[in-house]
Image (tube, grey):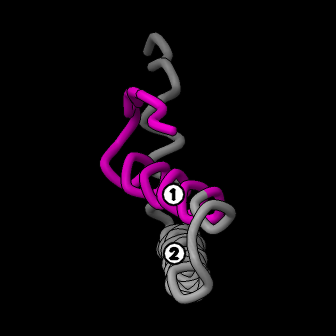
Amino acid sequence: MQVSQTITLTGDYESRVTELLRIARQQARLAQATVGPRMQDALAELEDALSDQLAALSNAAEADQADAETSGAAERERQSWRPLRAA
């Protein structure tokens, strides 16, 4: 059964990639129910690989954020959004 679906991606490139990987993982999971045993195995492996990649992206984002906090870059970024006070 063919299901026509359209997705729209928003946000920065990193969030778009993450969302695509989540969608691919979900589709791989759903596809396992309708195929033969060898294809189920292949799709399960794909689902696992996509989960690993999502975890790697999450870990990298957390590490980058920790580096930014340590270096002070995150605080400077937060300060840049505050309105300037009149002198």
Q: Position of residue 85 (x, y in %)?
A: 50, 16
Q: Nearer the viewer, mark 2 or mark 1?
A: 2
- Answer with the quarter of the image where residue 44 lies: bottom right
Q: Residues within 10 Å of mark 1 (few under 14, many from 20)?
A: some
Residue 84, placed above or below residue 21? above
* Residue at figure coordinates x 52%, y 26% from the top left: 82
Query: In the rendered structure, which disc, 2 or 1, sits on the residue that comes first in sequence?
Result: 2
> Which range of residues does the magenta coloring cover?
1-30
Residue 59: tell me if it is visible. no
- Magenta: main secondary structure equals helix
- Residue behind mark 2: 50
- Residue behind mark 1: 74
* Residue at figure coordinates x 55%, y 64% from the top left: 28
Q: Amino acid at mark 1?
A: Ala
Residue 7, placed above or below residue 72? above
Cα–Cα gap, marks 2 and 1: 29 Å
Residue 35, placed above or below residue 56? above
* Residue at figure coordinates x 31%, y 49% from the top left: 13
